């Protein structure tokens, strides 16, 4: 398993380093043991957090309501919990490789 992706209590735990206010939404790779993600949404009034949840939900084909930010609501370093997703599926879905 990777440092940025773990399983705890039947949930996938994803460590993320978020860069809001980018020119486009994309996964940039791994940065400091976290999945580096750039999003267009600004870090104002929770917009970047909402955009992150929608972005991850789209990649994992999971309902956004099932994804919880469990750490880092006001930080660039965030930890998300996603139930009922396998590590293998998540690795394929979140891979920054084509």
Image (cartoon, helix red, strand yellow):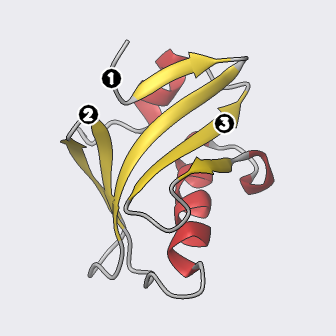
- In the depicted structure, whether residue 10 falls above or below residue 68: above
- In the depicted structure, whether residue 54 falls above or below residue 6: below
What residue lies at 38% left-to-right and 12% top-to-bottom?
Answer: 1
**Left or right: where 59 falls relative to 65:** left
What residue lies at 55% left-to-right and 31% top-to-bottom?
Answer: 13
Q: Quadrant of residue 35?
A: top left
Q: Is 40 or 44 nearer to us in this picture?
A: 44
Mark 1 or mark 3: whose residue is earlier in sequence: 1
Proximity of marks 2 and 1: CB atoms separated by less than 8 Å: yes
Where residue 46 appears, as percent x and y from the top left, is 59, 78
- Residue at the extreme right of the image, as rendered: 65
Proximity of marks 1 and 3: CB atoms separated by less than 8 Å: no
Residue carrying label 1: 3
Q: Secondary structure at mark 2?
A: loop
What residue lies at 70% left-to-right and 43% top-to-bottom?
Answer: 62
Q: Is 50 or 96 nearer to us in this picture?
A: 50
**Mark 2 crowdedness (10 Å alpha carbons): few <14, some 14-19, many ≥20:** some
How far apart in space, not on screen, are marks 3 and 2 (Cα)?
Answer: 18 Å
Q: Quadrant of residue 11?
A: top right
Q: Secondary structure at mark 1?
A: loop
Where residue 30 appears, as percent x and y from the top left, is 22, 40
The label on residue 33 is: 2
**Left or right: where 33 falls relative to 51:** left
The label on residue 82 is: 3
What residue lies at 72% left-to-right and 55% top-to-bottom?
Answer: 64
Mark 2 or mark 1: whose residue is earlier in sequence: 1
**Mark 3 crowdedness (10 Å alpha carbons): few <14, some 14-19, many ≥20:** many
How far apart in space, not on screen, are marks 1 and 3 (Cα)?
Answer: 16 Å
Where residue 39 appears, as percent x and y from the top left, is 38, 71
The label on residue 19 is: none
């Amino acid at each position: 398993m990777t440092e940025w992706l773990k399983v705890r209590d039947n949930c996938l735990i994803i460590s993320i380093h978020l860069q809001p206010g980018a020119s486009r939404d994309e996964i940039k790779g791994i940065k400091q043991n976290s999945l580096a993600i750039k999003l267009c949404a600004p870090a104002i009034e929770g917009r970047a957090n909402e955009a992150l949840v929608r972005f991850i939900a789209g990649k994992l084909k999971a309902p956004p309501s099932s994804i919880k930010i469990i750490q880092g609501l006001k930080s660039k370093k965030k930890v998300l919990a996603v139930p009922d997703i396998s590590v293998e599926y998540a690795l394929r879905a979140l891979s920054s490789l084509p």
